[in-house]
Image: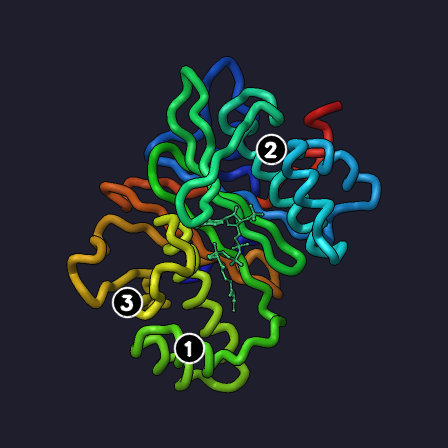
């Protein structure tokens, strides 16, 4: 099942209770939050306010991008990441500090007196997303559907056999969507476990309808410990979330468009 993220009103889930006040956090071990931000929504005057949320190191990285569109989506993603942390846990947006784990996964440096927050970022042409929970491994992936990928060739090279067959069987019109449906789930998973593409993508496979995972070798991981969600944040993008959880059915996932006015006003 795939949810059209725009269908749900941002006032429905636990995220609508924010921003966090009086030390009361919006996320816990049984909650995962997602914000996504379409770059089309960001007006010329708002970029400055978003860039101001970045750390010096993030600003230096942003400045290194050759293409403006890459700099912008990086800026939006990292500003939104800081904003979501502050919305859900209080603290100042520039107080959050990150370290890099093996294989490059950014992890928050623990803040005294609050539970261990786990966060993951994804950006693609025109869209950024960030996912947050407490303690558990979490990964998110967004992809732009207009990208020119050689779906069948990439699937043959990288996917498990059931996924290759599904991509081949898809009609020409739906092939990219089928391919990226699998791709976003697979990337969300390899990002949640922190291995990125050092984890071979053909050792596990997804059922797209159920958004459930299967491992070739039972010793690799336990499917019963994973929760996956699929979203359509707009006509041109697909998004998937992966969270490792001892009882995945207990996890409440709230996904909303990021409140741009809040982000832009954070440092005013
Ligand atoms: C981590 C990886 C899986 C993500 O790559 P991606 O899909 O290009 O990029 P995303 O936007 O989804 O994620 C990038 C973010 O993930 C985070 N990240 C980096 N390494 C990570 C890791 N090992 N695990 C989890 N997250 C990681 C970072 O925050 C990064 O953003 P930043 O550089 O702005 O801080 C990477 O291994 C990779 O190289 N992917 C190849 C992508 C590709 O070939 N795509 C073709 C699609 S058809």
* Residue 166 rendering spot, x and y as whole percentages: 37, 79
Q: In the image, 33: left or right of 55?
A: left
Position above or below: 126 against 173: above
Number of marks in the image?
3
Query: Which of pointers 3 and 2 indicates the residue nearer the eye?
Result: 3
Identified at 64% across, 38% down, the residue is 58
Q: How far apart are labels 1 and 2 at the CA level? A: 36 Å
Does dot 1 land on a helix, a strand or a loop?
A: helix
Q: Residues within 10 Å of mark 2 (few under 14, many from 20)?
A: many
The residue lying toward the viewer, choosing from 57 and 146, is: 57
Q: Quadrant of residue 265?
A: top right
* Residue 246 rendering spot, x and y as whole percentages: 23, 41
* Residue 175 rendering spot, x and y as whole percentages: 49, 80
User: Is disc 3 in contact with disc 1, using a CB cutoff of under 8 Å?
Assistant: no
Q: Residues within 10 Å of mark 1 (few under 14, many from 20)?
A: many
The verdict on label 3 being within 8 Å of ligand 1 is no
User: Which residue is under mark 1?
Assistant: 155
Q: Which mark is residue 56?
A: none
Q: Indicate the quadrant containing the C terminus: top left, top right, bottom left or bottom right.
A: top right
Q: How far apart are labels 3 and 1 at the CA level? A: 13 Å
User: Which residue is under mark 3?
Assistant: 203
* Residue 2 rendering spot, x and y as whole percentages: 44, 61
3 or 1: tag closer to the N-terminus: 1
Identified at 42% across, 52% down, the residue is 191
User: Which residue is under mark 2?
Assistant: 83
Does dot 3 land on a helix, a strand or a loop?
A: helix
Position above or below: 149 against 76: below
The residue lying toward the viewer, choosing from 261 and 147, is: 147
């Amino acid at each position: 099942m795939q949810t059209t993220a725009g269908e749900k009103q941002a006032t429905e889930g636990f995220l609508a209770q924010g921003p966090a006040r009086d030390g009361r956090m919006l996320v816990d071990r049984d909650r995962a939050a997602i914000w996504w931000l379409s770059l089309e929504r960001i007006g010329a005057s708002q970029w400055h306010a978003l860039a101001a949320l970045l750390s010096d190191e993030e600003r230096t990285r942003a400045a290194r991008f050759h293409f403006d569109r890459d700099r912008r989506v990086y800026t939006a993603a990292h500003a939104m990441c800081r904003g979501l942390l502050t919305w859900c846990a209080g603290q100042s947006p520039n107080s959050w500090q990150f370290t890099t784990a093996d294989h490059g996964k950014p992890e928050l440096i623990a803040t005294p007196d609050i539970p261990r927050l786990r966060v993951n970022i994804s950006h693609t042409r025109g869209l950024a997303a960030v996912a947050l929970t407490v303690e558990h491994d979490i990964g998110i992936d967004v992809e732009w559907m207009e990208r020119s990928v050689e779906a069948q060739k990439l699937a043959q090279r990288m996917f498990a056999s059931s996924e290759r067959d599904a991509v081949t069987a898809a009609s020409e019109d739906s092939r990219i969507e089928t391919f990226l449906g699998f791709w976003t789930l697979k990337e969300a998973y390899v990002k949640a476990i922190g291995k990125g593409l050092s984890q071979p993508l053909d050792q596990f496979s997804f059922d797209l309808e159920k958004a459930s995972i299967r491992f070739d070798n039972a010793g690799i991981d336990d499917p019963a410990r994973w929760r996956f969600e699929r979203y359509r944040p707009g006509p041109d993008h697909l998004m998937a979330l992966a969270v490792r959880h001892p009882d995945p059915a207990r996890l409440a996932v709230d996904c909303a468009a990021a409140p741009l006015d809040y982000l832009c006003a954070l440092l005013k």
